[in-house]
Amino acid sequence: MTPTLYLLRHGQTEWNAQGRLQGRLDSPLTALGRGQAKRQAQLIAALPPELQCWSSPAGRAVETARIALGGRPLAFDARLAEIDIGAFTGRTLSELQSAHPEQFSGGGLDWYDRTPQGEDFAALHARVRSFLDGLRAPAIIVTHGVTLRMIRLVAMGLPLARIGEMSVFQGALHRVSAGRHQVFF
């Protein structure tokens, strides 16, 4: 069974504000994004200081982690990186929907599983499972939207087909414990 997880999505970035998809590229946090990370700091303030803290190595996650976690020790793991969206990286969703309507015919998040030169859900699932299998104690994890959804899905033992049902919020704290999910704002 996966230990209790306290999950944070990075704060809003310049590309988030523009509707541009980042994937493995990076964009700095906006003032709103830094404010969201400060709110997360308030939400985790009462958590035990000895919790392990992990972050994706992407700059937006690292900046969020440094703000939200304050002086807590922090480790980085590439398995917490966002899903690689290959040739779609850096483009806007509306631009992609116009240029590649067939990719978006399934609805929801299904298109992430079919990006040209990208990572599919099975590969993301495998790297998230690998990371979670190594956790032995409760942890705070700073990551990205699709990866956070996958972490929740794996930790809760849900089928891959349910990934599109998972909501994720910037500036919030997602807690997964004993197969249950709670979100705190």
Image: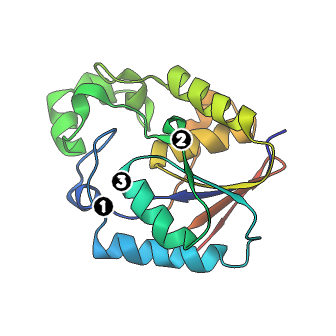
Counting from the top left corner in percent of width and height, residue 54 is at 59, 51
How many numbered circles does the render carry? 3
Which label sits in the foreground, 1 or 2? 2
Counting from the top left corner in percent of width and height, residue 35 is at 40, 78
Q: Is residue 119 left or right of residue 183?
A: left
Counting from the top left corner in percent of width and height, residue 124 is at 52, 28
Local crowd size for mark 1, using a 10 Å CA cut-off: few (<14), some (14–19), many (≥20): many
Looking at this view, is 166 or 135 the one in front? 135
What residue type is disc 1 on?
A: Thr
Dot 1: element: loop
Of labels 2 and 3, earlier in sequence is 3
Q: Which mark is residue 122?
A: none
Of labels 1 and 3, earlier in sequence is 1
Q: Which mark is residue 77?
A: 2
Which quarter shows the N terminus? top right
Which quarter shows the C terminus? bottom right
Q: Where 102 sits versus 83, above or below? A: above
Counting from the top left corner in percent of width and height, residue 114 is at 37, 21
Residue at horizontal 80 percent and vertical 43 percent from the top: 136
Which label sits in the foreground, 1 or 3? 3
What residue type is disc 2 on?
A: Asp
Q: Which mark is residue 59?
A: 3
Circle 1 residue: 13
Dot 3: element: helix
Marks 2/3: CA–CA distance: 13 Å
Of labels 1 and 2, earlier in sequence is 1
Looking at this view, is 103 or 142 the one in front? 142
Looking at this view, is 27 or 145 the one in front? 27
Marks 1/3: CA–CA distance: 10 Å
